Image: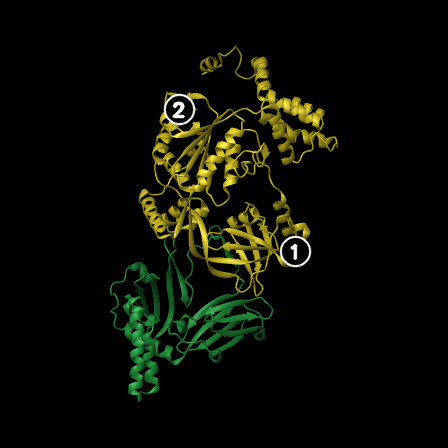
Amino acid sequence: MASLAAAQVQEVRSITRIERIGAHSHIRGLGLDDALEPRAISQGMVGQKMARKAAGVILQMIREGKIAGRAVLLAGQPGTGKTAIAMGLAQALGPDTPFTSMAGSEIYSLEMSKTEALTQSIRKSIGIRIKEESEIIEGEVVEVMVERSAGGGGARSGRLTLKTTDMETNYDMGTKMIDSLLKEKVQAGDVITIDKATGKINKLGRSFARARDYDATGQQARFVQCPEGELQKRKEVVHTVTLHEVDVINSRTHGFLALFSGDTGEIKSEIREQINSKVAEWREEGKAEMIPGVLFIDEAHMLDIECFSFLNRALESETAPVVIMATNRGITRIRGTNYKSPHGIPLDLLDRMIIVPTTPYSHQELREILNIRCEEEDCQMSADALTVLTRVATETSLRYAIQLITTASLVAKRRKASEVSMEDVKKVYSLFLDEHRSEQFLKEYQDEFMFNDGGGDAAQMMEVAQ
Amino acid sequence: MKRKFNLVENIDSSGQGNKFEGCSSETDKKYKMFKNTIWYNLLLNAEKTCLKDEQIKKIHYKFDDGKEMVEEYNVDTKVLLRRTWKMKGKLGGEGKWSVELGDPIPETTTNADSIAIIESKDQPVLLKRNTRVNIEWRIRNLPYPIETYSIKAQNDDKSIVISTSNKKYYKKLDVPELVRLGLPIEQMNIDATHKYNTLIITYKKPQELLNMDKEWFEELNKIKPIKDIPNECKTQ
């Protein structure tokens, strides 16, 4: 049993070590200096100086928190760093400022009306900092154990052992708790606090007793004393909750449990009004502080005319966050109408926005971005391979060139080379088509594809067949 | 604020009264003491509702500051069985009942998905009980022998502290009953036994507390119980 347990812990550790790399995981901020001037290459950001400078100004506006309900539009061609700038802004704001990110198309696939979905995301983007007494478990982690049940179905059970200088207790964990523990990469020797009601985990640092385990500590590990006394205490803690969370607590008898299960459904407008007046009261009494955050809507042209008119109105509310939208469309049809408008956004909403354009990257900038991505994807690339890749990026697209990095590095690994050479890049370039070459190919061989006999009459043929 | 002021006056006047009377018996003086506490006056002024369910009498208190408390008495033994407080979150929502004294209320929703983190089943469980002469704490699932424990009255933070020499268990027990009457916690009143994996700590109730219990039970008899109990309540 003991050996099994040890094996389990080992497994958990190895999983937590893996960091998955996303499209924007190299971005750590906006790359601005203290005067909000953009540095050439910093925090994963390259080029796009004007847009970044504009984002810096917006950042300042959000930080000051005075102005509610401004809308910003990031407009530019595909692959010019719109999402990257939004992510950078989120990073620069820090974890305490609510940042909600959604895609415009998301609102169509929820089990609620479009305006409710928008209202919820707007209210998710407004934080309230409030002091509240809650049950806190504070202790040093002795052991984390996660077991997968034999029956399959992914059901897991978790056990956590915590200690203070005076006592030791075992805890059972639910699925959500296990996930957040794994996400926070909690290991034996960490000193953590867990909010019993919300399940929020806060890593305080590593225990002094573990100061000698060099292998398990990162560079910025902070060492703290192991807590003393009881593990579980009632403490006044400063919570940052979003308006949406307060709505949910008050809309159901289950309270926080609904938040955990994710099943919140629609929330009555009376409840929202109640909460708004309550929050206003708290603010007046100085009990709570409002933190306006950011709602980021990617692919904003996917919203339809109803959403736009709703946003028009919602932005005028006092409790509106700063809304940042991004779109890669030019003059196009507004969804839900037959009218055409710049960026597919109605003119009255556009009028309320400040528009930040992003421009295509220069050759040199592309090279820098590819270089950063190579580092992020842990791939050694020779200088001439990088040159080839940059040329690929200029001629096709940046995204396609980025796709080639890991694929090329896998090809290089197969021939047991430590560095990706020009040949590897050429090989994957021939293996994987870019969008342009794929189109070319289709045009050439269209006749041989299914339902394509007799140039473009496919639809007619189908009808005849029926 | 106003009430507090009155209280101070009361204490003063009673002190003087004793001086003047001089001859009043010792028990009588103690008998009156608790009536001057904030706690007793809070209970007196609270809005009270009484429900009688066979052998159990339930009293619901609603205090001026919006707090709610429920007490359950055994009618035959006149002993308080359970005292619970409604805990309201600052952010709103339905509050939970937190048990100060007596058996915990069994939770209705115990499915594994909804629980974030909870003590394992084999971990020590604390239970506080009230008997006629003692306040009693039972801590189950504590396998260590009696020598392991040190139980100390700690008056600076008004609690009884249990610690273990093997550093496996540590607990601060609040004694709100004594704190409310402004009584100190006396080491000599504490007794502990260990049997069947259970540590039982008893605290002998001081005379003032016994008097207050008795007097308050009489006082509660003045409240007329509600006759028509809704069906849902009866089943519980």
State the residue lying farthest toward the bottom.
B23
Say whether disc 1 or disc 2 marks the residue closer to the N-terminus. Answer: 1
Which residue is denoted by mark 1 in the rendering? A211
Question: What residue is rendered at 47% in x and 43% in y?
Answer: A97
Callout 1 crowding tier (Cα within 10 Å): few <14, some 14–19, many ≥20: some
Chain identifier matching the yellow colour in the rendered picture: A
Viewport quadrant of the C terminus of chain B = bottom left
- Give the drawing colour for chain B: green
Which residue is denoted by mark 2 in the rendering? A334
Look at the numbered disc 2 and give the secondary structure of its residue.
loop
**Between A109 and A448, the one nearer to me in the picture:** A109
Q: Amino acid at mark 1?
A: Ala
Can residue B202 be seen in the rendering of this structure?
A: yes
Q: Chain of mark 2?
A: A
Question: What residue is rendered at 50% in x and 30% in y?
Answer: A51
Q: Are marks 1 and 2 on the same chain?
A: yes
Q: How is the image coloured?
A: by chain
Can residue A424 be seen in the rendering of this structure?
A: no
Instruction: Specify the label residue A81 is tagged with.
Output: none
Quote the CA–CA distance across marks 1 and 2: 60 Å
Look at the numbered disc 1 and give the secondary structure of its residue.
loop
Q: Amino acid at mark 2?
A: Ile
Total marks in image: 2
